[in-house]
């Protein structure tokens, strides 16, 4: 079945450590997105990418970095510069004028 | 960017219709209106979308105001499984051809048995 796979489901980070969240899709979608969700809040856009080797900052990109070397993959790195990284992170993809498909999310916590 | 405004929460009795409102007064002519719903600890799930005309699918109906400044998601017979947070979202297509989704804060729907 086609879909989006996010891993790991739970992730713990020590202070000052960078961590990378994985997002893979086999839907042949061009566009991919990363969102952050805090408890009881809506989704906020971190980064998005329309094509390979190109990506744009969203509304809250500071402290995060991404790469898009392959169409299927859009990893998100949470750097030590992100002072409040504890959140639920969601990856999504979409084809042209199609609905977004979401992964099941990664919950990141600070030790 | 345009934004959406939704009530924080709503309640409905099981098997009754539910009307979830959304205001998007700053919507532009090319923005699509999408609705998604989210269960706890899961990614959002697509419900329905439209541009100008009302839309129906097996999950719900979408009624779009004539001036497009508001829309209403209609669940015809609410079930306990419909309890979720419902997001009204604008899909912007920028001049460079990128698709950007603008999420609102969502409405938490509680369905009473």
Image: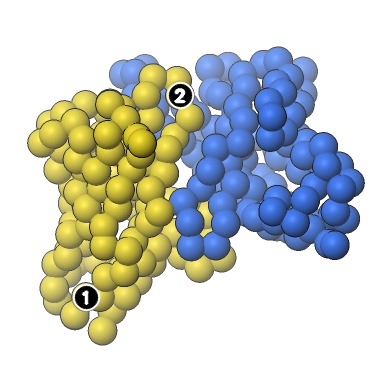
Chain colours: A yellow, B blue
The one of A89 and A15 positioned closer to us in this rendering: A89
Drawn side of residue A111 relative to residue A101, left or right: left
Residue at (28%, 26%) from the top-left corner? A28
Residue A57 in view (yes/no)? no
Percent position of residue A81, x then y: 19, 67
Q: Is residue B20 left or right of residue A66?
A: right
Q: Residue at x 25, y 75 (%)?
A: A12
Work out whether A106 lies above or below A2: below
| Disc nearer the start of the sequence (2/1) | 1
- Kindly identify which numbered label has been placed on residue A13: 1
Q: Secondary structure at mark 1?
A: strand
Q: Tell me the distance, in whole angstroms, between the alpha carbons under discs 2 and 1.
A: 35 Å
Looking at the rendered structure, which numbered label has been put on residue B48?
none
Figure quadrant of residue B65: top right
Residue A98's label in the rendered image is 2
Asked whether B70 or A37 is in front, the reply is A37
Query: Mark 2 Cα within 10 Å, few/some/many (few <14, many 20+)?
Result: few
Residue B75: image location, x then y, percent: 77, 39
């Amino acid at each position: 079945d086609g879909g989006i796979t996010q891993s790991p489901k739970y992730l713990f980070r020590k202070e000052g450590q960078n961590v990378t969240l994985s997002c893979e899709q086999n839907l042949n979608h061009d566009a991919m997105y990363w969102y952050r969700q805090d408890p009881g809040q809506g989704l906020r856009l971190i980064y998005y990418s329309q094509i390979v080797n190109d990506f744009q900052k969203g509304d809250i990109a500071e402290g995060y970095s991404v790469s898009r070397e392959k169409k299927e993959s859009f990893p998100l790195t949470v750097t030590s510069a992100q002072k409040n990284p504890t959140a639920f992170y969601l990856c999504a993809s979409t084809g042209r004028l199609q609905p977004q498909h979401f992964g099941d999310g990664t919950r990141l916590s600070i030790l | 960017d345009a934004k959406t405004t939704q009530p924080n929460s709503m309640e409905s009795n099981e098997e009754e219709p539910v009307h979830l409102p959304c205001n998007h007064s700053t919507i532009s002519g090319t923005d699509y209106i999408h609705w998604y719903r989210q269960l706890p600890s899961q990614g959002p799930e697509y419900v329905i979308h439209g541009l100008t005309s009302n839309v129906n699918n097996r999950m719900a109906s979408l009624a779009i105001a004539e001036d497009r400044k508001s829309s209403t998601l209609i669940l015809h017979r609410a079930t306990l499984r419909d309890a979720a947070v419902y997001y009204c979202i604008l899909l912007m297509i920028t001049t460079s051809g990128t698709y950007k989704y603008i999420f609102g804060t969502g409405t938490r729907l509680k369905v009473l048995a």
